[in-house]
Amino acid sequence: MNLEGLQIVARPRNHWEALDLGLLIARRWYRLLLTSWLCFAVPVFAACWMLLPASPGLAIFIVWWLKPVYERLPLKILSSAIFGSVPTVKGALRETRKCVSPGILSALTFRRLSPNRSFAAPVLVLEGLQGEVRRKRLLILQPKAGSAAFWLTLLGLHIEAFLVFGLIVGVYLFIPAELEIDWWSTMVSGSSGEQDWLISVLMFMAMAAVAPVYVSAGFALYLNRRIELEAWDIELGFKRLAQRALTSLMVVPMFGVLCLISSFDTHAIVVADPETDLTSAYEEILRDHPEFDSNTLSVARQESRTTIEAVLEGADFHNETTSRFPKFLEDFFESAENQPDQQVEGLLDFIRFVASVAEVLLWASVAIVVLWIAHRVRLLEKIGLLGRPRQKPKDRPTEIMGLSVEKSSLPEDVMGSARGEWQSGACRNAISLIYRASLSALIHEFHCEFSEGDTEGDCQRKVPRSLDEVAVLFSTLTRIWLLAAYAHQMPTEEEFTRLCDEWPRVFNTGRVGIPNRAETS
């Protein structure tokens, strides 16, 4: 792979730029790509024509199904042309077996309808990867280009359909009006073998016109992913720097050559191109041809003007016609008025079918819109833009940092029990009891959302600042508990007594709608 001969600018592009690059590549080598595609497609189409003369629809379906076979030789040609070595069709045909045989069975069976065919073909044809290795390679390449390859296939399918209808209308427009062929009625009322084969030929022409662009665009997507992953632009940049450094070593000899050349005299050759004097030329013509005098020219000019005005005043330039439909539709409706209703039944059936499909699509669109709106409303409610967001009730923890915070694990008189523990010398147990009671009250009465994995600092931060006295007292209690539990520094008798006096008043009052324990009892 000769990166120096690369015919495109090696830089990362987005998908749509890569597709546009594929169109430019197809335009540059369109004739070569089309010829190589036809080398396979024309023999297949001719064989189907001869073997299935009574089934043109089946014949064109076979030709369409074998499109992956025709696309491999143009892809092989592109892989060489893009690096500066443009092969001929004859030379490329010698490698037909190498580029057609790899994975052809899977390409024509379960992978035939893959929308990423144009992007995956280079991995199979050019890299020669199959099986699990091919799958892993595509997993690396496709995440950023698979959607563009899908839209490329969908767009190519629609362009082929538009070209077929355009060619049919074009054939009709080239029929002389003198032949009086009711083409539209013939198309609607029924079909014949010649007519089906004509449509098949037009479909084949549409496929041939789109195929080079489809192959080139898919190959451009593949190249763009290679440039992104393998950093071709960086590699070429380093090579240019190396070449520039090599060139700078030749500056001194080149300077001497330039000095030598500058010593020679140079002469400028001035070529005169004077303007022609039109007035003099006109006078010379009048001298040589006296019959072309000004009077004669004025009379001839007046006669020509009179003739032109007479022609413009004729009936041919004042014939106005108003049409409400395209001419072929107007001819059809005029002919239908004088013909039996049976000849337009095909058109009516077609219109009914289109109306049924449109109705189904319309109701499907309505259902999709309704579901989308419901989803958006649910999402807005979830994030709180439409009222208060829904929150799932969380399970209240039973233990925090190994301390039981259930109400059943606490004595009825917390302060009495804490004072008894303090007087008996179990100061740490007394502070632990008050701390557990505080956590339990914050969870069950003040609805603080603690979890089992929270630390003392987490619990302190989760207490709302709106609970003024509760937050201040819990902060003081947390500091006392940390010193007692981890530093073995117990509070003084005065601090413990003040804590025991303030705790019932703060945690046992009617805050945020919680009644006093004494009132509830």
Image: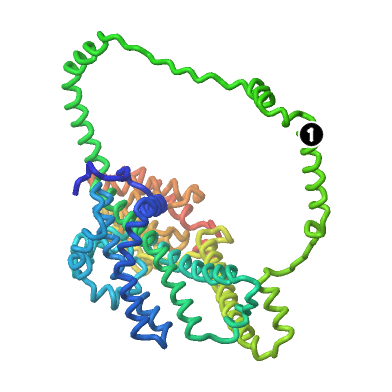
The quarter of the displayed image where residue 177 is located: bottom right
Horizontal side, residue 241 vs residue 8: left or right: left
As shown in the figure, which amino acid type bears the numbered disc 1? Ser
> x and y percent of residue 307 in the render?
80, 47
Q: Is residue 140 visible?
A: no
Q: Nearer the viewer, residue 343 or 459?
A: 343
Instruction: Residue at 46% x, 72% y: name it.
Output: 202
Using the rendered view, name the quadrant where residue 240 is placed. Answer: top left
> What residue is rendered at 45% in x and 64% in y?
155
Report whether 419 appears left or right of 97.
Answer: right
Indicate the position of residue 50 as horizontal and vertical percent values: 35, 83
In the depicted structure, whether residue 469 falls above or below residue 397 = above
Q: Is residue 428 left or right of residue 97?
A: right
x and y, in percent, of residue 108 in the image: 28, 76
Q: How is the image coloured?
A: rainbow
Q: Secondary structure at mark 1?
A: helix
* Residue underneath mark 1: 298
Q: In this orientation, which residue lies closer to the viewer: 29 or 414?
A: 29
Q: Is residue 163 left or right of residue 277?
A: left
* 44 vs 392: above or below: below
How dense is the environment of label 1, judged by Cα within 10 Å: few (below 14), some, or many (20 and up)?
few
Q: Is residue 506 above or below residue 64?
A: above
Name the foreground residue: 363 vs 98.
98
Position of residue 406 measured from the top left corner of the image (x, y, whole percent): 36, 66
Answer whether residue 342 is visible to the viewer in this image: yes
| Badge count | 1
